[in-house]
Image (cartoon, rainbow, N blue to C red):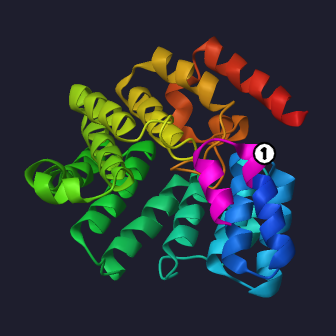
Amino acid sequence: MSLALVTRREGHWDQSIAYFEQALAVDPRNVPLLMDSAETCAMFRQFPAALTLYDRVLDITPNDPDGMGAKASIYQAQGNLQEAAKLLVDVNARTPAQFLFETKIVQLRLERNLGEAVRLLQARLAQFHVASQDEKAGEQVFFALTQRVAGDTAGAKITAEQARNTLEHLYRDQSDNLQALGPRARADLALQLSLACAVMGEKDPAIKTAEGAIMLLPRTNDAAAGPVYEENLALIETIVGENSPAISAFNQLLQTAYSSWYYGPAPITSALLRLDPIWDPLRSDPTFLKLIEDSASREAK
């Protein structure tokens, strides 16, 4: 299992999957091992294999929230919203599992049921007490992005500013504490700050901070996580109207193995680009439409 995780970070995907298979042959009912193995298959766009492994998780631990959320995410990546919805039907604002709840919000967004997504997030923020400032700010960023996609630009800017104030303080004013964190944690903080800035309309700080996240953890240092920050920069560019570099980034990301920040454990797919209203600003560009078409053809093979 350790060898599988190390080779995954190195980008040796076939070797990583082989190590996972060897580990599962020894310990076939190890749920964390099954989850990591399924995630690796998903990163590599081996979606049927990932679904099979998540089914094994749910056979061992029925209704496991991480297993249900991950399986639903795979269906979303394939564009199969009907199957994803079956796994998420009982998820609501009181659902304790954060990942499962966020997968429900993604589902509502892909279904373009944006009013319900906003309602659930508002209720969630009102009901749950988060453990730390950065967790609260992260939820506010997620909410601000949803408000913006739903058309509430003014409300999104207010929510994003609340998150930005917290994140900027953490990112810039506590540099000693920040340096004590690993590069992944620092890059994640930069990602959230860049998104808050973008929703507020602060173009230059948003792009600069998103580029900083890439430098903190480039794909050359971590093949599985590094592309996450490239995907985030593409989202920032989409929000602030820099469509051409965003489309260029997707041309590479659609052929890259990784776990998406927004859609994980799967990477970005043609179905997600086609369905998610986040990417609507790119739809008037024929290059973007051709990119989706070509990627869908590759994925179908």
Judged left or right of residue 82, residue 198 is left
Residue 145 image point, x, y percent: 39, 48
Q: Position of residue 262 (x, y in %)?
A: 52, 50
Which residue is at a point 40% across and 27% down the rendered structure image? 237
Residue 240: image quadrant is top left
In the image, which residues are magenta?
A: 1-16
Q: Which of 122 and 201 lies nearest the eye of the viewer? A: 201
Image quadrant in which the C terminus is located: top right
Q: Which residue is mark 1?
A: 14
User: Dominant secondary structure of the magenta stretch?
Assistant: helix
Name the image quarter holding residue 218: top left
Residue 228: x and y in percent read 50, 42
Residue drawn at 75 percent across, 27 percent down: 295
| 9 is within the stretch colored magenta | yes
In terms of secondary structure, where does tag 1 sit?
Answer: helix
What amino acid is labelled 1 in the image? Asp
